[in-house]
Image (tube, grey):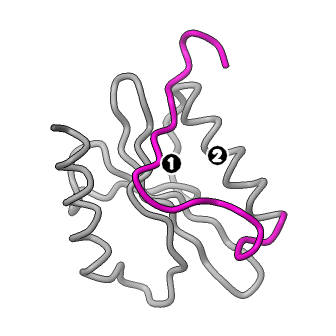
Amino acid sequence: MSENDKYLVWLHGEVKTPPFSVEARIKAGFLLRRLQKGELLEMPVSRPMPSIGQNCHELRINDKGKTWRIVYHIDFDAIAILEVFAKKTQKTPTEVIDRCKQRLQLYKQ
């Protein structure tokens, strides 16, 4: 990690095998590393989540029979991971959004 890289701050969740396949775990790690380097990711791998807060996004990881989401917040010196979950419907569940808002609020304090 270079001195310009952002820290990863895990407020909730983890990316491990299982339940992620090895391929999905590697893809998630690769995308998180790009974020640490300061790269802004766009669709189809990441999309903004303004319903959670400013600078909040979700990584979209397709896996064998599952679709994983990693909700994150981009801060000036860190990438804060707010939630990791398997998405089962098109709409992000309200309880996931609410938990992410709470974690973001605690992180900012």
Percent across and percent down for residue 79 are: 44, 37
Apparent side of residue 107 relative to residue 66 in the rendered image (left or right): left
Percent across and percent down for residue 75 are: 34, 32
- Residue type pointed to by label 1: Glu
Up the image or down, 99 lies above or below 88; here it is above
> Mark 2 = which residue?
31
Check disc 1 and report its element: helix, strand or loop.
loop
Percent across and percent down for residue 104 are: 24, 50
Image quadrant containing the N terminus: top right
Residue 14 falls in which quadrant of the image? bottom right
> Mark 1 = which residue?
42
Image quadrant containing the C terminus: top left
Residue 51 falls in which quadrant of the image? bottom left
| Residue at figure coordinates x 56%, y 64% from the top left | 60
Instruction: Choose between 55 and 5: the one closer to the eye.
Output: 5
Up the image or down, 67 lies above or below 55; here it is below
Up the image or down, 93 lies above or below 31; here it is below
Q: Residues within 10 Å of mark 1 (few under 14, many from 20)?
A: few
Percent across and percent down for residue 74 are: 37, 37
Instruction: Choose between 7 and 73: the one closer to the eye.
Output: 7
Apparent side of residue 84 relative to residue 11 in the rendered image (left or right): right
| Residue at figure coordinates x 50%, y 48% from the top left | 42
The magenta span reads 1-22
| Residue at figure coordinates x 42%, y 63% from the top left | 83
Q: Residues within 10 Å of mark 2 (few under 14, many from 20)?
A: some
Apparent side of residue 102 relative to residue 44 in the rendered image (left or right): left
Cβ atoms under marks 2 and 1 closer than 8 Å: no
Q: Is residue 18 magenta?
A: yes
| Residue at figure coordinates x 40%, y 43% from the top left | 80
- Residue type pointed to by label 2: Leu
